[in-house]
Image (tube, rainbow, N blue to C red):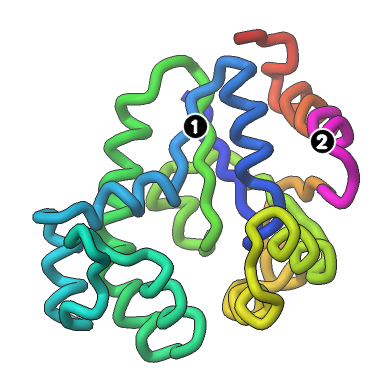
Amino acid sequence: MIRVALAGGIGSGKSAATAYLRGRGFAVVDADEVAREVVRPGRPAFVALVDAFGPAVLDGSGAIDRAFLASIVFSDPTARRRVEAITHPRIGEAMAAALEGAPGDVAFVALPLYRAEHRAQLGLDEVWALEVSPATALARLTAERAMEPADARARIAAQMTNEERRPLADRVIDNEGSPEDLHRALEDALAALGVGARRG
């Protein structure tokens, strides 16, 4: 199986890319989706987060308050490291298991916090970096996700920059344009991978 990571910061269009690839019939393992699973009530990461941050991290239903947790993570580097130490190993294990069970001969992995060590950990064959300018990311986050500008800027600043991510990628996909532009760029990348003729 060919394994390809889709890397990119917040607002870069990973969700749009994975939706298109899923529509084309490819398996996609999304780190954000896996992250929601590993912090469900009763799971080890859930227990560890409550132990680390107390009941304030829970919402009214007793689940992890992801918005509250995000506000801590993106405003406090120490808290971010604590959360990552709790969640990242469990997310990695779950993603590796999901890849092992993925159907087909090509699988994509959406990784917002891609790091060089993921290539070996997940057995990646290629890394595609979705890239937009910080200004475009900010505009998308405030318009499409109704984020406050200060919150959006903090999240963008907390992540790897395009310049830092680019050398780690095998292909950079510019996503400054329209959805159709993104689809064409993905088709070009699929063709270069040797699977451009596939349809879902």
Q: Which element type, helix, strand or loop, lies under badge 2?
A: helix
Task: Report the Cα–Cα distance between label 2 and label 1.
Answer: 19 Å
Reply above or below: 61 against 101.
Answer: below
Q: Position of residue 14 (x, y in %)?
A: 63, 46
Locate residue 124, reporting x and y percent. 50, 42
Where is 169 relative to 6, above or below? below
Quadrant for the C terminus, please. top right
Vertical relation: 71 (above or below) 21: below
Residue at the spot of label 1: 28
Q: Residue at x 32, y 75 (%)?
A: 83
Horizontal side, residue 23 vs residue 43: left or right: right
Residue 92 image offset from top left, x and y in percent: 33, 53
125 w.r.t. 64: above or below: above
Residue occupying the point 82% across, 48% down: 175
Q: Is 184 placed left or right of 162 in the picture? A: right
The answer to if 133 sits in the magenta stretch is: no
Residue 9 visible: no
Type of residue at label 1? Val
Residue 131 numbered mark, or none: none
Magenta stretch: dominant secondary structure: helix
Q: Quadrant of residue 85?
A: bottom left
Q: Earlier in the sequence, mark 2 or mark 1?
A: 1
Taking the image as shown, residue 112 lies to the left or right of residue 100, namely right
The one of 200 and 179 positioned closer to us in this rendering? 179
Percent of width and height locating residue 104: 46, 15
Please give the range of residues in magenta: 175-185
Q: Which residue is mark 2?
A: 179
Crowd rating for badge 2 (residues with CA inside 10 Å; few <14, some 14–19, many 20+):
some
For image coordinates 23% across by 80% down, the residue present is: 56
Q: Of residues 137 and 60, which is closer to you in this image? A: 60
Q: Is residue 86 left or right of residue 171?
A: left
